[in-house]
Image (cartoon, grey):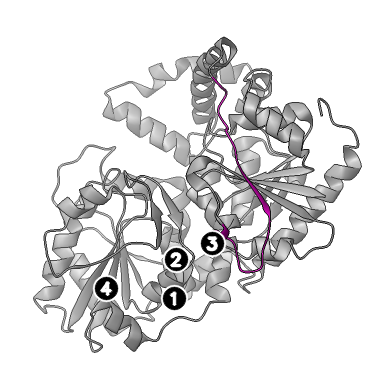
Amino acid sequence: MKILFVIDRSSAFREIVRSKVLEEMTQRPGVEVVLASTKRYQIKDSDLPEGVTVKRYVVDLEPGNSLTARFSYFLDKIFHTVSRDVACVLHPDSTLAQIRHSMLRARGKNIRNKLAYASFLASLGLRPIHFANLAERWGPYPEFTAFLKRQNPDLIVYSNMMMGQMDCLRAARRLGIPLLLDLPSWDQPTSKGPITVQPDFVVAWSQEMKEDLIRLHDIPTRSIHVGGVLYFDHYFDPPTIVSRDEYCRKMGIPPEHKIVLYSLSRIKSAPAAGGFIEKLYSMLRDSRLGFPVTLIVRANPLDDVNALKQEITRPDLLIQFPTGDFDANGSDWKAGPTEATDRIAAITYADVMVMIQSTMVLDAACLDRPIINLAYDNNLQLDEMQSVKRIFHFNHGQLYQKLGSTWMVRNEEELGKALVTYLHDPKLHSPNRLKLIAEIDPSRDGLTYKRWVDYVIKCTEESISSRPLRSGL
């Protein structure tokens, strides 16, 4: 059997290349693995686990420049917009709809009027899946189609459900090649989409994500497998990390200091994020917390490096960039081979984690580190689309708020209280942090990758037996 993995985003690279998936899958008898990456995520020999050899190709996922391709692009712009708006009407509680409503309000638009046409289409029984099925008829994707014909895989695995970004998979549908969508993030079912190419199989993290896929994306129950979180394996079967003394020495931190790790949100999407650097720096430097404390700012891997440098004016402030390969604009990132080890050490030795909101909530909870959420704009007058306050109303962030897994602060006084309390009592809210991770990944045994590979192979075997003939191959 031949399984083709499409690597087109940093999350896909992390899920497949930086996990134990390739090592495990290439050890299974009768399994051939092919990696198809975009140019940005071209996979080098040094990227692969030691001893792993797989075929690797750089592929073009674009529709081309022909008149047919340009017309398809025009149709897609219309259909993507219509599909998104219908999804927002059908599911106004989804994060996708909440973001759409915020954008319309920020622009002074009347939501009801703007989405009236979508309400009419929904009243006729139309759903995003109907638009996706219709759109499979167009979009040439000549290079990707030719590549698939040459490779003739039994299954394609991909990790991107951003609307329109994987329309190239229409070529696979037309050729009768089954698709498996591996969800790489906790918010994807409710904040991304609608899905524009329907997968045959989906791997979800949790039962809650499965229910979102059924309700929001019309994915059949039988097609969804709850498989846990691949990248959590690093936390529950961790690699060897340096000692705290060695970590402090490398970072230039006095070993007697407490460490506060501020996980920075993208400045572009949360303008208040940068201002909190100076706020935290001042609070920690003047010893008002009763401990000698060092602040580390952990940059967002997708942030603009130059913009970040403008925000940081303190020469003695420690900045930690995630290990990996950044592009020239700092807008894209490929995790390096030591990224997981470095991240685990940074979180393990942090006495308190501070952030607005990010998946680092889950990383910190996996290692049972205290988490402070900054739920205010730090005296900035921001509109709804820029304010951090909107983030805490999003659907996908409700679970940890409901469980009380983090300490949400809404002003400087609350921030100071939370810091002092957690530095004195890091086990406060520990049961709630463990509940959060248990809800998302009940196994927590470091063996998710084995079960994940088992399921992918099972799907491939099922596809081979049920699709003996392929159209167009």
Neighbor class of circle 1 (other Cα within 10 Å; few <14, some 14-19, many 20+) is: many
Q: Mark 4: which secondary structure? A: strand
Mark 2 or mark 3: which is in front?
3
For the residues labelled 4 and 1, say whether their Cβ atoms are less than 8 Å apart.
Answer: no
Q: Mark 1: which secondary structure? A: loop
Give the residue number, with chain letter if any, for mark 2: 339
Q: What residue type is labelled 1?
A: Asp
Majority secondary structure in the magenta region: loop
Q: Sequence-wise, which precedes: disc 4 or disc 1?
A: 4
Spot occupied by residue 325 in the image (x, y as percentages of width and height) = 41, 55
Please state which of residues 339 and 395 is positioned toward the viewer in this rendering: 339
Residue located 67% across and 65% down the image = 23
Marker disc for residue 260: 4
Q: Which amino acid does label 3 sit on?
A: Ser
Give the residue number, with chain letter if any, for mark 3: 46
Neighbor class of circle 2 (other Cα within 10 Å; few <14, some 14-19, many 20+) is: some
Report how far apart the C-alphas of labels 4 and 2 lie in the structure. 20 Å
Q: Mark 3: which secondary structure? A: helix
Spot occupied by residue 417 in the image (x, y as percentages of width and height) = 21, 72
Report how far apart the C-alphas of labels 3 and 4 lie in the structure. 33 Å
Q: Sequence-wise, which precedes: disc 1 or disc 2?
A: 2
Q: Sequence-wise, which precedes: disc 4 or disc 2?
A: 4
Q: Which amino acid does label 4 sit on?
A: Val
Spot occupied by residue 341 in the image (x, y as percentages of width and height) = 46, 72
Q: Sequence-wise, which precedes: disc 2 or disc 3?
A: 3
Give the residue number, with chain letter if any, for mark 1: 368
- Classify 285 as above or below 180: below
Mark 1 or mark 3: which is in front?
3
- The residue segment tinted magenta is 45-64
Q: Sequence-wise, which precedes: disc 3 or disc 4?
A: 3
